[in-house]
Image (cartoon, rainbow, N blue to C red):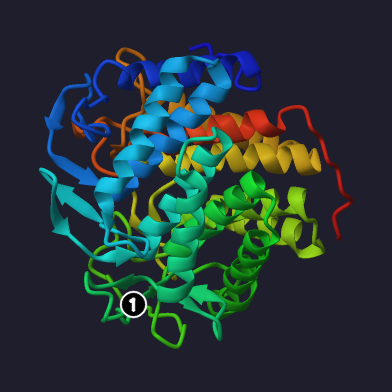
Amino acid sequence: MGYPDFESADFLKAHICTILDFYAPHAFDERGGFFHHFLDDGTIYDADTRHLVSSTRFVFNYVNAYFQTGDKRYQEWAEHGFAFLEHHRHGTDGHYIWQLQAGKIEDGRAMAYGHAFVLLASACAWRLNISGAKQTLYQVYDFMEKQFWEAEHNAYADERDISLASLSDYRGQNANMHSVEALIAAYEATGDAQFLTRAKQIAHQFCVVLAAQSGGQIWEHYDTGWQADWQYNIDKPDDLFKPWGFQPGHQIEWAKLLLQLDRISPEDWYLETAIRLFDTAMEKGWDTAYGGLVYGYAPDGRFADAHKYFWVQAEAIATSWRLYQRTLLARYQADYHRLWQWSWDHLIDHHNGGWYRITSQEGNWIEPYKSPAGKVDYHTMGACWDILSVLGKHSLKELKA
């Protein structure tokens, strides 16, 4: 079959609009916020659950949709979504509830991962001059610093109970990776250097210091001393937030973040490390039999979960383009196209719009739940917006042999 011009800004913008059009008739909840659970055709299959990650990602989506299209509806929806975050707030100190059910607390834990997305949503809202964005941004950052930051390890801990009295022994890369994403956005929105400084500290800790424990790759799970925990969730390679195994999608997201930092505040190690992380993830995570990147692989190289997830391909698409723009190496342009082509053939719903969440290893449709809690196509539209931000902006740097 023929493919569109994946390098065209017109294609990327049009593709974003097809995703927005999938959610537009269904997502808005007049009671506050947005619905979070959609079947393939847009039918809502859970009208009452509100997950902090979806609530915040909708703000990201609609702020960026407004800046792309100028459609006032998206500005209003961004304001609507940001206002709903008050329903997740617990007390007055910046604690946001992980999950609500019919307006009541279902899971009251304070999660660093969730607070990172409140920070990201606040940075987006700041760009749109939404009321309360500045106060929320600084308050949630102060909360993260007080409740999660471990200065001796240059990393955030992961979770506290609803009382904030108990800090979990679990330590992980996922919350820290998204914290870097949010800190970069906070810096770009405010110009406040403390956010950039913190982002750089965390990035170096995970991509250099901790990666040295695992052969240059980034392991998912750690103990309280930030030593790799090779057994945590060993029976759950498909866990949504804490899967066992090396995650090619996360290695690649880290590479993307390093490339973003390299554009903002260049350091020699960013590009070389981004290349290492991306190349290793593609080498070990690409399914040579059926195409696409798998969800996870074990330290011995076998696939831990061979399903194909939408977000893994989307993040790889964005990162391969950044690497191509940064290096002009043809192999990254080729990666960009093979990732788009596989996704076009297997993950994109050309009838209803949006991306399927997951396929079988072979690339076949396996479930009708296009967007459960946490998805809302933040990764797919975010990838397109990231590509658009650097499209045509070459920044060639001679690579060390």
Question: In the current view of this chain or complex, which residue is farthest to the right?
Answer: 398
Q: Residue at x 40, y 66 (%)?
A: 298
Q: Is 7 situated above or below 32?
A: above
Residue 114 in the figure: left or right of residue 292? left
Residue 385, located in which quarter of the rendered image? top right
- Which amino acid type is shown beneath numbered disc 1? Tyr
Residue 179 can be seen in this image? yes
Residue 148's x, y, as percent?
42, 74
Q: Is 63 situated above or below 162?
A: above
**Element type where label 1 sits in the image:** loop
Residue 182's x, y, as percent?
53, 52
Seen from the viewer's position, the closer of residues 290 and 293 is 293
Residue 399's x, y, as percent?
85, 54
Residue 372, located in which quarter of the rendered image? top left
Seen from the viewer's position, the closer of residues 260 and 114 is 114
Q: Residue at x 61, y 68 (%)?
A: 207
- Structural crowding at the residue carrying mark 1, measured as other residues with C-alpha within 10 Å and reported as few (<14), some (14–19) or many (≥20): some
Q: Residue at x 64, y 18 (%)?
A: 9
**Quadrant of image for the C terminus:** bottom right
- Labels in figure, total: 1
Residue 166's x, y, as percent?
26, 81
Residue pointed to by mark 1:
170
Residue 143 in the figure: left or right of residue 367? right
Residue 54 can be seen in this image? no
Residue 195, located in which quarter of the rendered image? bottom right
